[in-house]
Amino acid sequence: MGRYGNDAGAIMALVRKAEVHRDVYVDPEIFDLEMEHLFPNSWIYIGHASQLSKPGDFITANVGRQPLMASRHSDGAIHVFYNRCPHKGVKIASEPCGNTGKFFRCPYHAWSFKTDGSLLAIPLKKGYEGTGFPDTQASEGLAKVKNVVVYRDFIFVRLSDAGLSFADYFGESLSTIDNMVDRSPEGKLAVVAAPIRYMHNCNWKMLVENQTDTCHPMVAHESSAGTAVKVWKREQGDSTETPMAVQLYAPFMSPYEFYEQSGIRIWPNGHGHTGVANSIHSNYSDVEGYVEQMVATYGEKRAHEVLGEVRHNTIYFPNIMVKGAVQILRNFIPIAVDKTLVESWVYRLVGAPDKLYERALMYNRFINAPTSIVGHDDLEMYERAQEGLTSNGNQWVNLQRLHEPGEADDVTAVINGTSERQMRNQFHAWAKFMTMNMDKRVEAAE
Amino acid sequence: MITEKSITDFIYREAELLDTMQWDAWLALFHASGRYWMPLEWQQQDPVLQPSLMYEDLLLLKVRVERLAGERTFSQKPKSRCHHLLQAPTITACDPANGLFKARTSFIYTETRGDVLERYSGWASHDLIESDGHLKIKLKRIDLVNFDAPFGNIQLFM
């Protein structure tokens, strides 16, 4: 038994009003408890319904340490299962995505399952007659994840039986997903390609915090975005049009004042977003024909409402970030206390001009790829922090910027865009979802 | 007169410039409209409407090279170094009449920084054109054997 175990009090003591203890980033026991408590107690994104367009389509995903799979059944319903054969535990699906046909078949002993997870057939079935097999969990087929919500094609699961409902958990934060979907003239997004994958030797929460950290771009990204601006100024010659690439890089060098006025909105349960009034995505060139398409679908007023909402980064606690304005979702997948796999997905706006998809793909490879110079800047900071935090000279991380005495938790508010309040909001949620089922577990054990 | 040997020599010379970190000389090998492409899909056809790890023109390559020397480029403190181990290139086109010069080269690439060393394997495809009597890169394409794996930072050029 380590220091923290099921001690809710010890976990909560790691989060102060405006500081967090470094153990949340570096202690392997805390990471184990996150896998056991935080991830099962939260609603976690596992994929997009467009990846399951036909019956028999499946995807695989991990939530915490739990291997899952989702499938499209013949009646059109989406089902989510634990990815293990009820017989000997062999993973049924071994690829990120595919089509299984009419049924899943375990490659080891040919137990087979319908795409709703129910047991279809076992070879030599008579060997189970009179053994009491119908009373076992194995006879029920693939173990189902009960709490599944598909919101506007985004598939979320909560593994714990107890916890907040989907609606209570996300509340108004779903407006960012709404805005991203509404940006399609057909109200529909599609995943048409694999994500960019990028391994980070740091704790997953550093990445999550960085998404609403507006005081780092002009410092950490001076080397990438700053150089891009400098080289363009020198090389532009007589060009009157700023290339798409420079339009994407340049806003990273916006001054503090820009981020201050653009604002941050926080929501209960650790969700929040940067870029309320405007954002680094506000001033991209118009794409020919797109606004007209949107007006045709939504009418003048609604179309401009949708396109006028250019939020920067929205955190859906605990581990995804959504950019509606460029149709990107980053999934920060925890692997170990100091290892995080980042998968950055681009959604295609169904019915919209190709140019928008081209821009989203370009943004993704400029910012979120292992070959991205902006990514290099960030990962260097995370890795240095992962090493630096082992220092005993100071065991606390400071999140005090624009902290106000008596600051309320779990509220909706719009605040100065350079505040670290969204990080505080995340850690309040972290302590809550880490501990919410702990006392019960202790009682059950006694 | 461009021969098959000129193409092979060009490819070896390019790798040498990268391994010796002569970045400006390396950039000078590109044609003004040249591109450096690292696909993210098997036998990928489209660099624009399919995702890639890199698809960069000369402006963006200049940004990368200038960044490597920047005073505040913290991911280059300490600096990275690289090593190219090339198989003899296979010439897939050497057609001076039509200005077509192409080769495919199997490689093992090593990039190191501090105490960390990473190895990558794949194929480099060179699409070259003749400009004022010299070969220039129209397209350099890098297909990694494990293009879909999650890498850490790749900061130099394959």
Image (cartoon, rainbow, N blue to C red):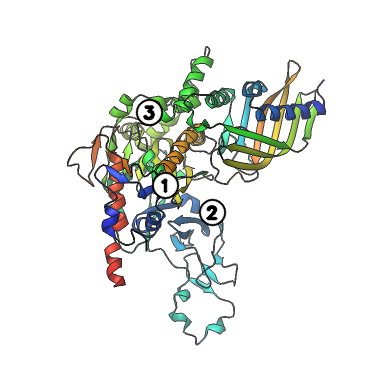
| Amino acid under disc 3 | Ser
- Res. A135 image quadrant: bottom left
What is the C-alpha distance between the residues marked 2 and 1? 21 Å
**Mark number displayed over residue A63:** none
| Amino acid under disc 2 | Pro
The residue pinned by badge 1 equals A204
Whether residue B33 is situated above or below residue B122 in the rendered picture: above
* Residue depicted at 44% across the width and 68% down the height: A143
As helix, strand or loop, the secondary structure at mark 3 comes to loop
Image coords of residue A121 (percent x, y):
54, 74
Closer to the chain start, of discs 3 and 2, is: 2
Q: Do badges 3 and 2 share one subunit?
A: yes
As helix, strand or loop, the secondary structure at mark 2 comes to loop
Binning the other alpha carbons within 10 Å of mark 1 as few (below 14), some (14 to 19) or many (20 upward) gives many
Closer to the chain start, of discs 2 and 1, is: 2
The residue pinned by badge 3 equals A282
Mark 2 falls within which chain? A
